[in-house]
Image (spheres, helix red, strand yellow):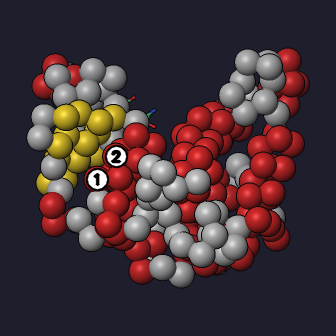
Amino acid sequence: MKLYNNAQSRGMTLFPLLKELEIEDQIEQIHILYEKMHQAEYLKVNPMGKVPCLVDKGIVISEVAAIFTYLADKYMEKGLAPALDDPKRGAYLKWLFFCHGPLTEYMDLKGLGVSDEQIEQRKRSLTFGHEESVLAFLKNGMQQANPYLLGEKISAADLYLAYWLVFAISFKILPYLDEFKPFIQLIGSRDSMKDVPWFQKINA
Ligand SMILES: N[C@@H](CCC(=O)N[C@@H](CS)C(=O)NCC(=O)O)C(=O)O
């Protein structure tokens, strides 16, 4: 497999997953400079001109959540994805796609400094609705985590959510609420997360 990526991109969310799946040695990492992403050579791989992008035997998978889902399913025996007939599969997909859609849209708009008034005016068409819904959804999920989102076993959704949470908290896009702490500390204590700088930053 080839993973087209850039160390300053959201593609870094995938590294803990590769470590947990123990497949780092099966993936050729291809570093793409931002200046090259919209040039013909890379557009042939991903016409969106974006990273990350995974290519597995000619199958092209762009979009971080799709890559999480694809890899966790491909290596299902590693236990990071519930089986297709496992009732936990619904919550698993919900969390992966909540992170990919509403949470990242919210983070992008907050990071750009879009005002609360503008968000309020567009709340019906924004995928996250409004800020209180995002915070309430996250708090509720964290409170119900036992200790992971799906219960006793960690999943790829925990890795993806924890990465985005610590990133957003580090950049003061989200507050570091008490409700988040047990979950963040639990995921942050894993070997696969030790190179993720945002964990150290929020605890500094
Ligand atoms: N929806 C895509 C977004 C990917 C994305 O926006 N990647 C950025 C880096 S974080 C990128 O490649 N930017 C290059 C560009 O737009 O020129 C995903 O989640 O995978």
Q: Where is residue 41 in the image (x, y as percent from the top left)?
A: 13, 25
Q: Position of residue 18 (x, y in %)?
A: 31, 63
Query: Of helix, strand and loop, which one carries label 1?
Result: helix
Q: State which quadrant residue 12 falls in.
A: bottom left
Q: Residue 74 carries which label?
A: 1
Q: What element carries label 2?
A: helix
Please name the residue shown 32% across and 66% down the image.
77
Check disc 2 and report the residue beneath it: 70
**Quadrant of the rendered image holding ligand 1:** top left
- Asked if disc 2 and disc 1 are in contact, CB closer than 8 Å, the reply is yes
- Amino acid of disc 1: Lys
Q: Quadrant of residue 147?
A: bottom right
Residue at left offset 61%, top offset 63%: 150
Q: How crowded is mark 2: few (under 14 residues within 10 Å), some or many (20 or more)?
A: some
CB at disc 1 and ligand 1 closer than 8 Å: no
Q: Is residue 59 above or below residue 185?
A: above
The reply to whether residue 164 is in sight is no
Q: Residue 104's spot in the image, x, y percent? A: 60, 40
Visible in this render: residue 37? yes
